[in-house]
Image: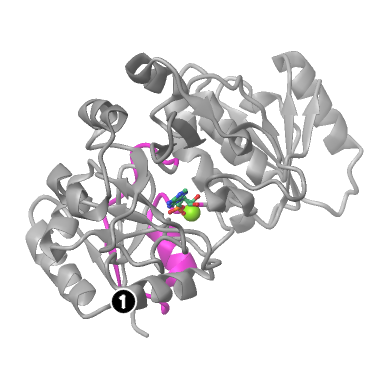
Amino acid sequence: METIILKADKNNIKTVTDKAAEIIKQGGLVAFPTETVYGLGGNGLDPKAAKKIYEAKGRPSDNPLILHISSPEQLTPLVKEIPQSSKKLMEHFWPGPLTLIFKKSDRVPLETTGGLDTVAVRFPENYIAREFISACGVPIAAPSANSSGRPSPTRASHVEFDLKGKIDMIIDGGHCEFGLESTIVDLSSDKPCLLRPGSITVEMLKDVLGDIDIDKAVLTKLENGERPKAPGMKYTHYSPSANVIIVRGSDENVIAKINSMIAHMDKGLKTGVIASKETKDRYRADEVLVTGSRQDPAEIASNLFKMLRKCDYHNIDIVFAEGLPENELGLAIMNRLKKAAGYEIYDV
Ligand code: AMP
Ligand code: MG
């Protein structure tokens, strides 16, 4: 299949999104930018489009898709009820990087929700995403536009690398502002529960809701037999081919431990470090990949997946990543890093 790739900006957006909407109406797939990561979109009410999405990504079909809408009014027909707590969250954080889980209505096919009776919905802020969804006239089912298991795409080139030839179109809207997938909050049972951390932090959610539960899968590796509430959280994720190892502790201890592990490594192996601007010059690895400044966790978040992808680009065998404190945005960054590392962490 030929994949059309078109750059979109303020001047040509209508032409590009009209073409993309035509493809969606014919049952095809279009990757598009959002403020979190690129999404792989199909008609959210069409079971066949859902099937195509799973196939293109190589995604297990029990891992549900998020429905993206272009105005809050589009939510009502998709859900059984809109609880009070969700109204507050929508007021504060929509449009934006927050996905909410509701009891689904009969209009939403089980193929889209991976067989669940709940549905995940997000109203993104990115103007290209909104114009595209609005031109389609239906909710757009969209997981991250990467091959299953790989780091999520934050540039059109990442989507092209993973999915060229497997999907109809890629809308190139530049790099994604936040760079981590949306925060997910489940509102389908009595107490709101965080299923996936993101750029809307636990601290921000607590300011609005008072309190919120945190699903165990957000913080730790689940034991055999334990199930996360977001089915996707059980899969290995974000992995470059390199073996990823997190080292956590004071700066001096982390630098010393990583340099010592590198010094003892088989000379045939290519080493990397995912580091901050403040520490980058202290490492003796083959490649040092800089995510951003410790003073600016948002910069680190927005570059993390790009750096995980760079590990493959540089054919790195083992990459050490500096751990971060797990508060505010650090919780989401560490959640992605831990999954990339298969929870291999040294505390020093
Ligand atoms: P992705 O689109 O790749 O960011 O993945 C979407 C995430 O949302 C996965 O972790 C899914 O398991 C989760 N998700 C989607 N729908 C639901 C739902 N109805 N209940 C719980 N988790 C969901
Ligand atoms: Mg994903």
Q: How is the image coloured?
A: one colour
- Whether residue 335 sits left or right of residue 269 in the image: it is left
Can residue 280 be seen from the camera position used here?
yes
Q: Amino acid at mark 1?
A: Asp
Instruction: Examine the rendered structure and indicate whether residue 319 appears above or below residue 173.
Output: above
21 vs 311, left or right, is left
Q: Which residues are magenta?
A: 152-180
Q: Residue at x 11, y 50 (%)?
A: 10
101 to the left or right of 94: right
Q: Does residue 288 appear anywhere in the picture?
A: no
Dot 1 alpha-carbon crowd within 10 angstroms: few under 14, some 14 to 19, many 20 or more? some
Of residues 296 and 83, the one nearer the viewer is: 83
x%, y% of residue 341? 70, 43
Q: Mark 1 falls on what kind of element?
A: loop
The quarter in which the C terminus is drawn is: top right
Q: Nearer the viewer, residue 175 or 42?
A: 42
Q: Residue at x 52, y 40 (%)?
A: 304
Quarter-of-image position of residue 17:
bottom left
Residue 167 located within the stretch drawn in magenta: yes
Name the residue: 26% across, 78% down.
27
Q: Is residue 138 above or below residue 130?
A: below
Quadrant containing the N terminus is bottom left
Residue 256 location, x and y as percent?
Answer: 81, 22
Q: Residue at x 38, y 64 (%)?
A: 112
Residue 187 in percent (x, y) is at: 38, 37
In this view, which residue lies farthest toward the bottom?
1
> Can you give x and y, in whole percent of width and height, for residue 110 in the image?
40, 66
Tag 1 residue: 168
**Magenta span has 317?**
no
> Vertically, is 11 above or below 3?
above
